[in-house]
Amino acid sequence: MDDTSRSTRSLQMQAHFAGEWQSSSDGAEVPVTSPATGRQIGTVPKLTRDDALRAIDAARRAFVNWSALTAAQRAAYLKRWHALILREREGLAQILTLEQGKPLAEARAEIDISAAYVEWFAEEGRRVYGDVIPSPAMGRQTIVTKHPVGVTCAITPWNFPASMITRKVAPALAAGCTMLVKPSERTPFIALALAELAEEAGIPAGVLSVITGSSRELVKVLTDSPTVRKLSFTGSTEVGKELIRQCAGTVKRMSMELGGNAPIIIFDDADIGPALDGLMALKFRNGGQTCVCANRIFVQQGIAEAFTQAFVERVGGLKIGAGDAPGIQIGPLINAAAAQDMARIVARAVEQGATVLAGGIANDTDSAFYPPTVLGDVTPDMDVARDEIFGPIAPLLVFDDEAEVIAMANDTPYGLASYIYTRDLARAWRVSDALEYGMVGINEVAISNEVAPFGGVKESGFGREGSRYGIDEYLDVKYRCMGGLSA
Ligand code: SIN
Protein backbone atom coordinates (compact mmCIF):
# COMPACT_ATOMS: atom_id res chain seq x y z
CA MET A 1 0.00 0.00 0.00
CA ASP A 2 1.52 3.37 -0.93
CA ASP A 3 1.08 6.35 1.37
CA THR A 4 -1.62 8.11 -0.67
CA SER A 5 -4.01 5.16 -0.32
CA ARG A 6 -4.07 5.53 3.46
CA SER A 7 -6.90 8.03 3.19
CA THR A 8 -10.44 7.06 2.12
CA ARG A 9 -10.83 10.51 0.56
CA SER A 10 -8.55 11.10 -2.41
CA LEU A 11 -6.09 13.96 -2.22
CA GLN A 12 -6.87 17.05 -4.27
CA MET A 13 -3.55 18.03 -5.85
CA GLN A 14 -4.48 21.27 -7.57
CA ALA A 15 -4.82 24.78 -6.19
CA HIS A 16 -8.19 26.51 -6.21
CA PHE A 17 -8.82 30.07 -7.37
CA ALA A 18 -11.12 31.99 -9.68
CA GLY A 19 -13.60 29.16 -9.18
CA GLU A 20 -11.34 26.59 -10.86
CA TRP A 21 -8.85 23.87 -9.97
CA GLN A 22 -5.55 25.14 -11.21
CA SER A 23 -1.99 24.02 -11.88
CA SER A 24 0.92 26.42 -11.82
CA SER A 25 1.17 28.34 -15.08
CA ASP A 26 4.78 27.14 -15.42
CA GLY A 27 3.94 23.55 -14.40
CA ALA A 28 6.11 23.60 -11.25
CA GLU A 29 5.13 21.47 -8.27
CA VAL A 30 6.05 21.09 -4.61
CA PRO A 31 6.31 17.60 -3.06
CA VAL A 32 4.48 16.84 0.19
CA THR A 33 5.72 14.11 2.53
CA SER A 34 4.25 12.10 5.38
CA PRO A 35 5.97 12.85 8.71
CA ALA A 36 5.43 9.27 9.88
CA THR A 37 7.23 7.62 6.96
CA GLY A 38 9.21 10.44 5.36
CA ARG A 39 7.78 9.29 2.02
CA GLN A 40 6.19 11.54 -0.58
CA ILE A 41 2.39 11.46 -0.50
CA GLY A 42 1.70 13.83 -3.37
CA THR A 43 2.45 17.20 -4.94
CA VAL A 44 0.73 20.57 -5.15
CA PRO A 45 1.25 23.36 -7.68
CA LYS A 46 4.06 25.80 -7.03
CA LEU A 47 2.07 28.81 -8.19
CA THR A 48 3.84 31.77 -9.74
CA ARG A 49 3.58 35.42 -8.84
CA ASP A 50 1.23 35.94 -11.82
CA ASP A 51 -0.98 33.05 -10.71
CA ALA A 52 -1.28 34.70 -7.29
CA LEU A 53 -2.16 38.05 -8.87
CA ARG A 54 -4.91 36.35 -10.89
CA ALA A 55 -6.24 34.77 -7.70
CA ILE A 56 -6.32 38.17 -5.97
CA ASP A 57 -8.13 39.71 -8.89
CA ALA A 58 -10.75 36.94 -8.86
CA ALA A 59 -11.26 37.52 -5.12
CA ARG A 60 -11.71 41.26 -5.82
CA ARG A 61 -14.38 40.55 -8.41
CA ALA A 62 -16.13 38.00 -6.20
CA PHE A 63 -16.27 40.50 -3.32
CA VAL A 64 -18.79 42.67 -5.20
CA ASN A 65 -21.59 40.09 -5.16
CA TRP A 66 -20.62 38.25 -1.97
CA SER A 67 -20.62 41.40 0.15
CA ALA A 68 -23.98 42.42 -1.33
CA LEU A 69 -25.71 39.25 -0.07
CA THR A 70 -27.66 39.36 3.15
CA ALA A 71 -26.00 37.86 6.21
CA ALA A 72 -28.67 35.15 6.15
CA GLN A 73 -27.78 34.21 2.56
CA ARG A 74 -24.09 33.95 3.45
CA ALA A 75 -25.02 31.93 6.53
CA ALA A 76 -26.88 29.45 4.35
CA TYR A 77 -23.73 28.78 2.29
CA LEU A 78 -21.63 28.42 5.45
CA LYS A 79 -24.13 26.03 7.03
CA ARG A 80 -23.99 23.81 3.95
CA TRP A 81 -20.18 23.86 4.19
CA HIS A 82 -20.43 22.97 7.89
CA ALA A 83 -22.70 19.99 7.15
CA LEU A 84 -20.34 18.72 4.42
CA ILE A 85 -17.29 18.95 6.69
CA LEU A 86 -19.11 16.79 9.23
CA ARG A 87 -20.29 14.37 6.54
CA GLU A 88 -16.65 13.95 5.44
CA ARG A 89 -15.25 13.89 8.99
CA GLU A 90 -13.46 10.56 8.72
CA GLY A 91 -11.85 11.17 5.33
CA LEU A 92 -10.72 14.63 6.39
CA ALA A 93 -9.28 13.29 9.65
CA GLN A 94 -7.30 10.69 7.70
CA ILE A 95 -5.84 13.35 5.42
CA LEU A 96 -4.86 15.38 8.48
CA THR A 97 -3.09 12.43 10.08
CA LEU A 98 -1.43 11.48 6.82
CA GLU A 99 0.11 14.87 6.11
CA GLN A 100 0.47 16.28 9.63
CA GLY A 101 1.13 13.14 11.67
CA LYS A 102 -1.18 13.69 14.67
CA PRO A 103 -3.06 10.70 16.13
CA LEU A 104 -6.38 10.00 14.39
CA ALA A 105 -8.37 10.73 17.55
CA GLU A 106 -6.85 14.21 17.66
CA ALA A 107 -7.40 14.66 13.93
CA ARG A 108 -11.11 13.83 14.35
CA ALA A 109 -11.33 16.34 17.19
CA GLU A 110 -9.71 18.96 14.98
CA ILE A 111 -12.25 18.35 12.22
CA ASP A 112 -15.05 18.77 14.77
CA ILE A 113 -13.73 22.11 16.00
CA SER A 114 -13.08 23.19 12.40
CA ALA A 115 -16.74 22.58 11.62
CA ALA A 116 -17.81 24.32 14.83
CA TYR A 117 -16.07 27.54 13.77
CA VAL A 118 -18.00 27.49 10.48
CA GLU A 119 -21.35 27.01 12.21
CA TRP A 120 -20.60 29.60 14.90
CA PHE A 121 -19.66 32.33 12.44
CA ALA A 122 -22.54 31.49 10.09
CA GLU A 123 -24.75 32.45 13.01
CA GLU A 124 -22.60 35.32 14.28
CA GLY A 125 -22.70 37.00 10.85
CA ARG A 126 -26.39 37.67 11.46
CA ARG A 127 -25.58 39.59 14.64
CA VAL A 128 -23.28 42.25 13.23
CA TYR A 129 -25.01 45.15 14.91
CA GLY A 130 -24.23 48.84 14.60
CA ASP A 131 -25.03 51.70 16.97
CA VAL A 132 -27.11 54.82 17.14
CA ILE A 133 -25.32 57.16 19.53
CA PRO A 134 -27.18 60.03 21.27
CA SER A 135 -26.11 63.10 19.35
CA PRO A 136 -24.27 66.05 20.98
CA ALA A 137 -26.26 68.56 18.91
CA MET A 138 -29.91 69.14 17.97
CA GLY A 139 -31.03 68.04 14.51
CA ARG A 140 -28.34 65.43 14.05
CA GLN A 141 -28.08 61.65 14.18
CA THR A 142 -24.89 59.74 14.91
CA ILE A 143 -25.07 56.32 13.26
CA VAL A 144 -22.47 53.56 13.25
CA THR A 145 -22.58 50.67 10.78
CA LYS A 146 -20.14 47.81 10.12
CA HIS A 147 -18.86 46.75 6.70
CA PRO A 148 -16.68 43.92 5.37
CA VAL A 149 -13.05 45.03 5.01
CA GLY A 150 -12.82 43.59 1.47
CA VAL A 151 -10.42 41.02 0.05
CA THR A 152 -8.55 39.29 2.89
CA CYS A 153 -5.88 36.64 3.16
CA ALA A 154 -4.87 34.00 5.69
CA ILE A 155 -1.47 32.43 6.18
CA THR A 156 -2.04 29.23 8.08
CA PRO A 157 0.27 26.89 9.97
CA TRP A 158 0.92 23.15 9.80
CA ASN A 159 0.15 22.33 13.45
CA PHE A 160 -3.65 22.77 13.17
CA PRO A 161 -3.97 22.92 9.40
CA ALA A 162 -7.77 22.55 9.34
CA SER A 163 -9.04 24.52 12.34
CA MET A 164 -6.68 27.44 11.75
CA ILE A 165 -8.26 27.76 8.30
CA THR A 166 -11.92 27.69 9.31
CA ARG A 167 -11.23 29.94 12.30
CA LYS A 168 -10.18 32.62 9.78
CA VAL A 169 -12.26 31.81 6.70
CA ALA A 170 -15.61 31.46 8.50
CA PRO A 171 -15.63 34.94 10.12
CA ALA A 172 -14.23 36.51 6.94
CA LEU A 173 -16.94 35.00 4.74
CA ALA A 174 -19.70 35.59 7.27
CA ALA A 175 -18.71 39.27 7.44
CA GLY A 176 -18.94 39.55 3.63
CA CYS A 177 -15.21 39.42 2.83
CA THR A 178 -13.56 37.13 0.33
CA MET A 179 -10.44 35.25 1.39
CA LEU A 180 -7.29 33.75 -0.10
CA VAL A 181 -5.68 31.05 2.04
CA LYS A 182 -2.00 30.22 1.78
CA PRO A 183 -1.60 26.97 3.75
CA SER A 184 1.74 25.71 5.00
CA GLU A 185 3.74 23.89 2.30
CA ARG A 186 3.83 20.90 4.67
CA THR A 187 0.05 20.50 5.01
CA PRO A 188 -1.75 21.73 1.88
CA PHE A 189 -4.06 18.74 1.33
CA ILE A 190 -6.49 19.40 4.16
CA ALA A 191 -6.82 23.01 2.94
CA LEU A 192 -7.61 21.80 -0.57
CA ALA A 193 -10.11 19.24 0.76
CA LEU A 194 -11.89 22.03 2.66
CA ALA A 195 -11.95 24.09 -0.55
CA GLU A 196 -13.52 21.14 -2.41
CA LEU A 197 -16.28 21.00 0.18
CA ALA A 198 -16.78 24.78 0.01
CA GLU A 199 -17.22 24.40 -3.73
CA GLU A 200 -19.71 21.56 -3.19
CA ALA A 201 -21.56 23.82 -0.73
CA GLY A 202 -22.01 26.26 -3.62
CA ILE A 203 -19.79 29.02 -2.25
CA PRO A 204 -19.34 31.18 -5.36
CA ALA A 205 -16.18 31.36 -7.47
CA GLY A 206 -13.42 33.54 -6.04
CA VAL A 207 -14.94 33.81 -2.55
CA LEU A 208 -12.56 31.23 -1.05
CA SER A 209 -9.25 30.49 -2.77
CA VAL A 210 -6.43 28.18 -1.71
CA ILE A 211 -3.10 29.09 -3.26
CA THR A 212 -0.19 26.68 -2.91
CA GLY A 213 3.54 26.91 -3.39
CA SER A 214 6.44 28.76 -1.87
CA SER A 215 5.43 30.91 1.09
CA ARG A 216 8.36 33.20 0.50
CA GLU A 217 7.11 34.13 -2.99
CA LEU A 218 3.34 34.03 -2.60
CA VAL A 219 3.10 35.79 0.75
CA LYS A 220 5.01 38.77 -0.61
CA VAL A 221 2.48 39.07 -3.46
CA LEU A 222 -0.33 39.10 -0.89
CA THR A 223 1.32 41.58 1.47
CA ASP A 224 2.32 43.95 -1.36
CA SER A 225 -1.13 43.96 -2.94
CA PRO A 226 -3.20 47.10 -2.32
CA THR A 227 -6.29 45.00 -3.17
CA VAL A 228 -5.77 42.73 -0.15
CA ARG A 229 -7.02 44.77 2.80
CA LYS A 230 -6.40 42.37 5.67
CA LEU A 231 -3.98 39.61 6.62
CA SER A 232 -4.54 37.03 9.33
CA PHE A 233 -1.54 34.97 10.36
CA THR A 234 -0.91 32.12 12.77
CA GLY A 235 2.72 31.18 13.24
CA SER A 236 5.97 32.21 14.87
CA THR A 237 6.65 35.63 16.34
CA GLU A 238 9.70 35.94 14.10
CA VAL A 239 7.66 35.48 10.90
CA GLY A 240 4.83 37.62 12.33
CA LYS A 241 7.20 40.54 12.80
CA GLU A 242 8.35 40.24 9.20
CA LEU A 243 4.73 40.17 7.97
CA ILE A 244 3.90 43.25 10.03
CA ARG A 245 6.81 45.03 8.30
CA GLN A 246 5.62 43.81 4.89
CA CYS A 247 2.03 44.96 5.48
CA ALA A 248 3.13 48.46 6.49
CA GLY A 249 3.47 49.50 2.85
CA THR A 250 -0.27 49.11 2.24
CA VAL A 251 -1.39 49.74 5.85
CA LYS A 252 -3.37 46.50 6.00
CA ARG A 253 -5.46 45.39 8.90
CA MET A 254 -3.82 42.43 10.60
CA SER A 255 -4.50 39.68 13.11
CA MET A 256 -1.40 38.02 14.51
CA GLU A 257 -1.57 34.76 16.46
CA LEU A 258 2.09 34.32 17.27
CA GLY A 259 4.34 32.28 19.53
CA GLY A 260 3.87 31.48 23.20
CA ASN A 261 5.82 30.44 26.27
CA ALA A 262 2.90 29.28 28.38
CA PRO A 263 3.37 28.81 32.10
CA ILE A 264 1.27 26.28 34.00
CA ILE A 265 1.37 26.94 37.75
CA ILE A 266 0.43 24.13 40.11
CA PHE A 267 -0.01 25.34 43.68
CA ASP A 268 0.32 23.17 46.79
CA ASP A 269 -3.44 23.39 47.31
CA ALA A 270 -4.33 22.12 43.81
CA ASP A 271 -6.43 19.05 43.22
CA ILE A 272 -3.51 16.88 42.08
CA GLY A 273 -5.41 14.33 39.94
CA PRO A 274 -7.06 16.93 37.67
CA ALA A 275 -3.83 18.98 37.58
CA LEU A 276 -1.90 15.95 36.36
CA ASP A 277 -4.57 15.05 33.79
CA GLY A 278 -4.62 18.68 32.63
CA LEU A 279 -0.85 18.84 32.30
CA MET A 280 -0.68 15.60 30.31
CA ALA A 281 -3.35 16.80 27.88
CA LEU A 282 -1.85 20.27 27.60
CA LYS A 283 1.77 19.30 27.14
CA PHE A 284 1.37 16.36 24.80
CA ARG A 285 -1.59 17.32 22.54
CA ASN A 286 -0.25 17.33 18.98
CA GLY A 287 3.12 16.17 20.34
CA GLY A 288 3.59 19.51 22.09
CA GLN A 289 3.39 21.36 18.76
CA THR A 290 0.89 23.96 19.88
CA CYS A 291 1.46 27.59 20.72
CA VAL A 292 -0.72 27.31 23.84
CA CYS A 293 0.87 24.17 25.29
CA ALA A 294 2.78 24.25 28.60
CA ASN A 295 6.29 25.48 27.96
CA ARG A 296 7.18 25.99 31.63
CA ILE A 297 5.69 23.86 34.38
CA PHE A 298 5.90 25.58 37.78
CA VAL A 299 5.22 23.26 40.73
CA GLN A 300 5.08 24.57 44.30
CA GLN A 301 7.72 23.20 46.68
CA GLY A 302 5.35 21.31 49.01
CA ILE A 303 4.08 18.96 46.28
CA ALA A 304 7.06 19.06 43.91
CA GLU A 305 8.51 15.63 44.67
CA ALA A 306 5.26 13.67 44.64
CA PHE A 307 3.93 15.53 41.60
CA THR A 308 7.14 15.00 39.63
CA GLN A 309 7.14 11.29 40.38
CA ALA A 310 3.53 10.86 39.29
CA PHE A 311 4.12 12.94 36.15
CA VAL A 312 7.21 10.97 35.12
CA GLU A 313 5.26 7.74 35.56
CA ARG A 314 2.40 8.98 33.37
CA VAL A 315 4.81 10.20 30.67
CA GLY A 316 6.55 6.82 30.64
CA GLY A 317 3.19 5.20 29.78
CA LEU A 318 2.47 7.29 26.67
CA LYS A 319 2.10 5.29 23.47
CA ILE A 320 4.13 6.67 20.55
CA GLY A 321 3.77 5.69 16.90
CA ALA A 322 2.25 6.51 13.51
CA GLY A 323 -0.95 8.54 14.00
CA ASP A 324 -3.16 6.00 12.23
CA ALA A 325 -2.11 3.07 14.45
CA PRO A 326 -4.63 2.13 17.17
CA GLY A 327 -4.25 3.70 20.62
CA ILE A 328 -1.42 6.07 19.68
CA GLN A 329 -1.13 9.15 21.91
CA ILE A 330 1.97 10.79 20.40
CA GLY A 331 2.60 10.82 16.67
CA PRO A 332 5.69 11.97 14.80
CA LEU A 333 6.75 15.61 14.86
CA ILE A 334 6.22 17.49 11.63
CA ASN A 335 9.56 16.33 10.21
CA ALA A 336 12.95 14.92 11.12
CA ALA A 337 14.44 18.41 11.50
CA ALA A 338 11.92 19.13 14.28
CA ALA A 339 12.99 15.96 16.11
CA GLN A 340 16.62 17.00 15.80
CA ASP A 341 15.69 20.38 17.29
CA MET A 342 14.25 18.53 20.31
CA ALA A 343 17.49 16.58 20.76
CA ARG A 344 19.41 19.87 20.64
CA ILE A 345 17.09 21.55 23.18
CA VAL A 346 17.52 18.65 25.63
CA ALA A 347 21.31 18.56 25.18
CA ARG A 348 21.53 22.31 25.80
CA ALA A 349 19.30 22.07 28.90
CA VAL A 350 21.50 19.31 30.31
CA GLU A 351 24.59 21.39 29.57
CA GLN A 352 22.95 24.23 31.56
CA GLY A 353 22.23 21.98 34.56
CA ALA A 354 18.87 20.26 33.88
CA THR A 355 18.31 16.56 34.60
CA VAL A 356 16.54 14.18 32.20
CA LEU A 357 13.83 12.38 34.22
CA ALA A 358 12.15 10.63 31.26
CA GLY A 359 12.76 10.28 27.51
CA GLY A 360 15.36 12.56 26.02
CA ILE A 361 17.46 10.13 24.03
CA ALA A 362 19.59 11.37 21.13
CA ASN A 363 17.67 11.36 17.89
CA ASP A 364 18.05 9.20 14.80
CA THR A 365 18.52 11.88 12.14
CA ASP A 366 16.02 10.41 9.65
CA SER A 367 13.12 10.01 12.02
CA ALA A 368 10.45 12.56 12.94
CA PHE A 369 9.70 10.73 16.21
CA TYR A 370 10.96 12.12 19.50
CA PRO A 371 10.08 10.61 22.89
CA PRO A 372 8.09 12.61 25.43
CA THR A 373 10.72 14.01 27.77
CA VAL A 374 10.64 15.40 31.31
CA LEU A 375 13.39 17.71 32.53
CA GLY A 376 13.99 18.38 36.24
CA ASP A 377 16.20 21.00 37.96
CA VAL A 378 15.20 23.60 35.38
CA THR A 379 15.75 27.26 36.28
CA PRO A 380 14.16 30.31 34.61
CA ASP A 381 17.40 31.47 33.01
CA MET A 382 17.90 28.26 30.96
CA ASP A 383 17.18 28.39 27.22
CA VAL A 384 14.53 25.67 27.59
CA ALA A 385 12.54 27.99 29.87
CA ARG A 386 13.00 31.09 27.73
CA ASP A 387 12.35 29.82 24.18
CA GLU A 388 9.25 28.26 22.69
CA ILE A 389 9.92 24.49 22.58
CA PHE A 390 7.18 23.32 20.16
CA GLY A 391 7.63 19.66 20.96
CA PRO A 392 7.17 17.00 23.67
CA ILE A 393 9.65 18.33 26.22
CA ALA A 394 8.30 19.19 29.68
CA PRO A 395 10.58 21.40 31.83
CA LEU A 396 9.75 21.38 35.57
CA LEU A 397 10.55 24.41 37.72
CA VAL A 398 9.98 24.49 41.49
CA PHE A 399 8.76 27.67 43.26
CA ASP A 400 8.14 28.79 46.84
CA ASP A 401 5.46 31.47 46.82
CA GLU A 402 2.86 33.26 44.77
CA ALA A 403 4.74 36.53 44.20
CA GLU A 404 7.83 34.66 43.01
CA VAL A 405 5.92 32.49 40.53
CA ILE A 406 3.95 35.43 39.11
CA ALA A 407 7.20 37.29 38.46
CA MET A 408 8.75 34.22 36.79
CA ALA A 409 5.64 33.48 34.72
CA ASN A 410 5.53 37.05 33.39
CA ASP A 411 9.25 37.22 32.69
CA THR A 412 8.95 36.55 28.95
CA PRO A 413 8.22 38.62 25.85
CA TYR A 414 5.31 36.27 25.11
CA GLY A 415 1.75 36.58 26.42
CA LEU A 416 -0.55 34.00 24.81
CA ALA A 417 -1.89 31.35 27.20
CA SER A 418 -1.29 30.61 30.88
CA TYR A 419 -2.78 28.13 33.33
CA ILE A 420 -3.14 27.80 37.09
CA TYR A 421 -4.28 24.97 39.31
CA THR A 422 -5.48 25.91 42.81
CA ARG A 423 -8.53 25.30 45.00
CA ASP A 424 -8.28 28.76 46.54
CA LEU A 425 -10.80 31.01 44.78
CA ALA A 426 -9.21 34.27 45.93
CA ARG A 427 -5.80 33.09 44.74
CA ALA A 428 -7.26 32.04 41.40
CA TRP A 429 -8.64 35.54 40.87
CA ARG A 430 -5.51 37.32 42.16
CA VAL A 431 -3.04 35.29 40.11
CA SER A 432 -5.10 35.29 36.92
CA ASP A 433 -5.37 39.08 37.24
CA ALA A 434 -1.59 39.41 37.57
CA LEU A 435 -0.72 37.13 34.64
CA GLU A 436 0.15 39.18 31.55
CA TYR A 437 -1.53 36.82 29.09
CA GLY A 438 -4.45 36.98 26.67
CA MET A 439 -5.87 33.73 28.05
CA VAL A 440 -5.83 32.09 31.48
CA GLY A 441 -7.07 28.57 32.15
CA ILE A 442 -8.07 28.14 35.80
CA ASN A 443 -8.22 24.45 36.78
CA GLU A 444 -8.79 23.81 33.05
CA VAL A 445 -6.53 23.45 30.02
CA ALA A 446 -9.04 23.00 27.17
CA ILE A 447 -9.41 26.72 26.61
CA SER A 448 -9.68 26.85 22.83
CA ASN A 449 -13.19 26.73 21.34
CA GLU A 450 -15.42 28.58 18.92
CA VAL A 451 -17.24 30.72 21.49
CA ALA A 452 -14.16 32.11 23.27
CA PRO A 453 -11.73 34.85 22.15
CA PHE A 454 -8.40 33.19 21.35
CA GLY A 455 -5.39 35.50 21.19
CA GLY A 456 -2.43 37.00 22.96
CA VAL A 457 -0.72 40.15 24.18
CA LYS A 458 2.90 41.36 24.02
CA GLU A 459 4.92 39.53 21.34
CA SER A 460 2.28 36.80 21.08
CA GLY A 461 0.36 39.15 18.80
CA PHE A 462 -2.94 40.97 18.54
CA GLY A 463 -6.47 40.35 17.34
CA ARG A 464 -8.84 37.63 18.49
CA GLU A 465 -10.23 34.53 16.80
CA GLY A 466 -13.43 32.70 17.68
CA SER A 467 -16.28 34.31 19.65
CA ARG A 468 -18.14 37.49 18.78
CA TYR A 469 -14.79 39.33 18.86
CA GLY A 470 -13.52 37.17 15.99
CA ILE A 471 -15.85 38.63 13.39
CA ASP A 472 -14.90 42.23 14.26
CA GLU A 473 -11.47 41.49 12.80
CA TYR A 474 -13.12 41.43 9.35
CA LEU A 475 -15.35 44.49 9.75
CA ASP A 476 -14.67 48.20 9.32
CA VAL A 477 -16.68 50.72 11.30
CA LYS A 478 -18.36 53.55 9.41
CA TYR A 479 -19.75 56.55 11.28
CA ARG A 480 -22.40 58.67 9.60
CA CYS A 481 -23.21 62.12 10.96
CA MET A 482 -26.61 63.11 9.57
CA GLY A 483 -27.46 66.77 9.98
CA GLY A 484 -30.35 69.02 9.01
CA LEU A 485 -32.90 66.87 10.82
CA SER A 486 -34.53 69.62 12.92
CA ALA A 487 -38.22 70.15 12.25
C1 SIN B 1 -2.23 26.74 18.29
O1 SIN B 1 -2.45 27.66 17.48
O2 SIN B 1 -1.13 26.24 18.38
C2 SIN B 1 -3.32 26.26 19.21
C3 SIN B 1 -4.58 26.22 18.52
C4 SIN B 1 -5.73 25.88 19.41
O3 SIN B 1 -5.53 25.30 20.48
O4 SIN B 1 -6.83 26.23 19.03
Image (tube, rainbow, N blue to C red):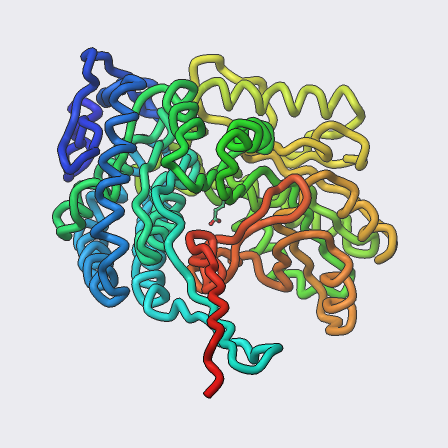
Residue at image x 18%, y 50%? Answer: 203
Q: Would residue 338 be found to the left or right of residue 53 on screen?
A: right
Q: Which residue is at the front of the view, 394 or 479? A: 479
The x, y position of residue 487, in whole percent, is 46, 88
Query: Does residue 336 lie above or below 179 as drawn?
Result: above
Q: Which residue is at the front of the view, 258 or 346? A: 258
The x, y position of residue 213, in whole percent, is 31, 21
Rendered image quadrant of residue 267: bottom right
Q: Which residue is at the front of the view, 141 or 27? A: 141
The x, y position of residue 394, in whole percent, is 64, 38
Q: Would residue 441 be found to the left or right of residue 106 on screen?
A: right
Q: Is residue 1 visible?
A: yes
Rendered image quadrant of residue 291: top right
In the rendered image, the residue lying farthest to the bottom is 487
The x, y position of residue 23, in whole percent, is 17, 21
Residue at image x 58%, y 18%? Answer: 362
Residue at image x 62%, y 47%? Answer: 416
Q: Is residue 359 visible?
A: no
Q: Would residue 332 be found to the left or right of residue 346 on screen?
A: left
Residue at image x 69%, y 45%? Answer: 297
Q: Would residue 382 be found to the left or right of residue 345 on screen?
A: right
Q: Locate the N terminus by quadrant.
A: top left
> For the image shown, how many numbered marks are present on the structure?
0
Q: Which residue is at the front of the view, 482 or 75? A: 482
Query: Does residue 373 lie above or below 29 as drawn?
Result: below
